[in-house]
Amino acid sequence: MPGVAKQACTSSPRSSRESMSQRTRIGQSYHHARRLGAILAVLLGLVPTLALAQHPGSVFDGATPQARSISDYFVLVLILAAVVFVIVEGLLVYVLLRFRARPGDGRPRPVFEKQHLEITWTVIPILLVALLFVLMLPVMGAAEDAPPDAYTVTAIGHQFWWEFRYPEQNAIAANEMHIPVGEKIRLRLQSADVIHSFWIPRLNGKLDLIPGQTNEWVLEADTPGEYMGQCAELCGVQHAWMLLRVFAQPRPEFDAWVAQQAQPAAAPTDPTAQQGAEIFRQQACGNCHTISGSHDPGGVAPNLTHVGSRTTLAAGALTNTAENMRRWIHNPQDIKPGANMPTFKLSDAELNAVVTYLEGLK
Amino acid sequence: MATIEQVAPVPRLTSADTLWSWVATVDHKRIGIMYLLGALVFLVIAGAEALLMRAQLATPGGHVISPSFYNQLLTMHGTSMVFLVGTPGVIGFANYAVPLMIGARDMAFPRLNAMSLWLFIFGGLLMHFSFLAGQTPDTGWFSYAPLTAHFASPDYRVDYWILGTLIPSIGTIATALNLIVTIFLFRAPGMTIRRLPLFAWMMLITSFLIIWAFPPLTAAQAMLLVDRWLGGHFFNTMAGGLPILWQHLFWAFGHPEVYILILPAFGILSEVIPVFSRKPIFGYNFMAAATVAIAFLSYLVWGHHMFATGYSIPINASWGALSVLIAVPTGIKIFNYIATMWGGSLHFTTAMLFCIGFVGTFVFGGLSGVTLALVPIDWQVTDTYYVVGHFHFVLIGGTVFGLFAGTYYWFPKMTGRLLSERLGRWHFWLFLIGFLLTFVPMHLTGLIGMPRRIYTYPAYPGWSELNAISSIGAVFMALGALAFVWNIIRSLSHGEKAGDDPWDAYTLEWATSSPPPPDNFREPLPPIRSRRPFWDRKYPDEADWKTEHGG
């Protein structure tokens, strides 16, 4: 069984994967499970009230071999659980209807035990759970595997934002991660403060970011797109607004993106933007926020070198528009009370300049 | 009623009804009732906390309460329900019923018993004083390190959490010792261990669980205090500390704790279902053995709360294997209850309705628990509303329904009056419907990506609708709880007189008056030759010792 899983993961994707998995009986039931999983994914979409372009989807809507492996297994387990549920609840309902006290009931015959029956309903559950356990092992292996030479991204959890480092290109991003599509990416998870958890349901199960240790996870999106998730371990007052976005792109586009992220900040040419850069320096924003090419320490807040090219601000609390950036800098505590960014008393003109500057950092 | 000072061994027994006589009592019956009253008060408070949370989550981007207050509510709700409602609730019934069921005059250590009670009350008051002090705990009921470290929680909230739980825990451990000694040494002649009523057996096993489980929590909390205030590094990474150590110690307590909460409820079912089926419990031996198996396994599975922390496949798989095994003895109990009802003559009193509700919901909660024990599934659904749905199914459908059943069953013995069956039905149906509306959708909410412990959420498809349904359900639960409280208040003065044995029951507590005299039994006990000694005396031609071989 481990052999089947590994083959499914490393073979060239899509077309050959399905036929590969259908060759075995386990593979066939996984295939059926996948269809049921898709139905569940649709059912769970429910009545859409789409206020945002993207949403996390469901655990049954996997976009990676790992997530699909988990959801196929989950569907099998749910089917078995449903069968047990129907049988046991059915027996309960039957008993309640059939043995209701009626007038003139004699005293029921006492039955103290029936050893054969009791042994049977001990042994059968043991066999069932053993079966579930055995089927579980290859799914665990499939979800964790990343070859030693896989492209590596390091995610560092902060209260209340995500830092992403691309060591090969020396690039640092925040809150939005890009990965090349169709490849196994090794994700190294670390924390700068408390425990956080990295969870994007369509990509894989979750894994914690724990200070003092590095956990490793695998992402292998097989379709380009935007995948959403959020921090899944209570990390403080703004745990709710620590959203997570992963953009999976074809390799050439990804290479262009990460090369761009590795570039130092574009020097502002517009006079308003230059004024904004000066205010940024005067207000010592650089004490927390790095803009590379400057000499500021930064590090405790998102790197802003390319903030203009991000789709959201404040770890997903706002879409990235000039107006929202104004609102955020003007009073972050209004939008995300408890976030670590203080409120700056800037005049409208100063705000304008800073926003022009930052939005220009693409 | 004649005073009994001349009966020396248990001092200060009284049937006086002054406030002081209750405050100063060492009578297990009064202590039990006070535990239950305390648990009820904290149930209402913790329930109100939940209602506020559900109001906040009813719509996306809600502004009912602030983010920091939300975190305080979720922490207080969880902590109170576990430490100030569930645990005292089961201990309250244990205190009341166990000495009576085994034919004893009181617990082995009555003064220690009183100490335990007052530690619970004081600890609960201290915990809630934190609201007045503006220092309400806000790091979750399991308070993970290093969110609780001084750098991340610089004020006194964590310390209120520590002390508010540690103080009652001392009392809980003492009660466990008290119960073990009482059950081993104070059984009436003829009541062998194998003839112990199942509620007493469950409390015996639970007491061993308590003695194993609570000390790791207390130790961890002491270590956390050292970290926070004395420069220790147990849980932070300087000088080699490990945040994950907190999780090991906490869950070494936390997992057995949930069995501490559920085994007594199983015990209550094991008393109530047979009485209202007019049959003895089916499969006593397997029930008793299954309880021991559950207790033993519960010590070994704590890591299933940590599947997402980064341990290797062999380690996680081992915890998973042990965790799924617990489904087996638990399933045995459920089958035994159905088999007890099979061929019986079922009387749907409110106590019985709650038992049936327990069985029906616990099957669902147990099955969702099996899915959570399977590691890769857990990787997706842990720390989401799926887990919140699961544990509320087993803790409300299990523990709370069991406590409700115990209340309707034993209230007549405690007070001499029956609770109203009419109000009881309102209580049951409002609460059950509300419960299902609130917690079934949560499984779906978790499956579509909603993590736990978030004070608000974006308007993602499905999230708003499911959250709205859950919030509506909470209102129904509140109405059901109000019916319960009203039932108790009204029945204390207007309830129908119960007599000694309103249910035609089987065990020794029904062989004395309602309420019992201070020293429990005035008349000689029935001879104990089976597991149903009172039944045997009432129906000598169908006595168990005649119809059942062995036992």
Image (spheres, coloured by chain):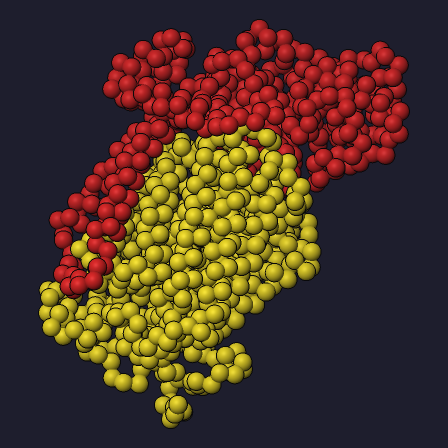
Chain colours: A red, B yellow
Q: Residue furthest front?
A: A103
Q: Position of residue A116 (x, y in %)?
A: 13, 49
Where's the C terminus of chain B, which quadrant? bottom left
Q: Quadrant of residue B102?
A: bottom left
Image quadrant assignment for residue A173: top right
Nearest to the observer: residue B259 or residue A209:
B259
Name the residue located 54 percent from the left edge and 9 percent from the top edge. A250
| Residue A153 appears anywhere in the view | no
Residue at (36, 56) in percent of width and height: B354
Q: Measuring from the top left, give residue B440's x and y in whole percent.
A: 43, 41
For the point 31% across and 11% down, the residue is A19
Q: Establish if A114 lies above or below B180.
A: above
Q: Nearer the viewer, residue B331 or B149?
A: B331
Image position, residue B245 (x, y; %): 50, 45
Residue B543, above or below A311: below
Res. B390 image quadrant: top left
Most foreground residue, B308 or A90? A90
Q: Is residue B530 above or below residue B307?
A: below
Viewer-closest of B298 and B72: B72
Looking at the image, residue A205 lies above or below residue A90: above
Residue drawn where x is 38% and y is 53% of the image: B398
Q: In the image, A217: left or right of B285?
A: right
Q: Is residue A197 left or right of residue B113?
A: right
Q: How many marks?
A: 0
**Left/right of residue A350 with respect to residue B478 in the rendered view:** right
Quarter of the picture containing the N terminus of chain B is bottom left
Left or right of A158 on screen, residue A86: left
Q: In x, y percent, where is residue A221?
A: 49, 17
* Residue B312 is at least partly visible in this image: yes
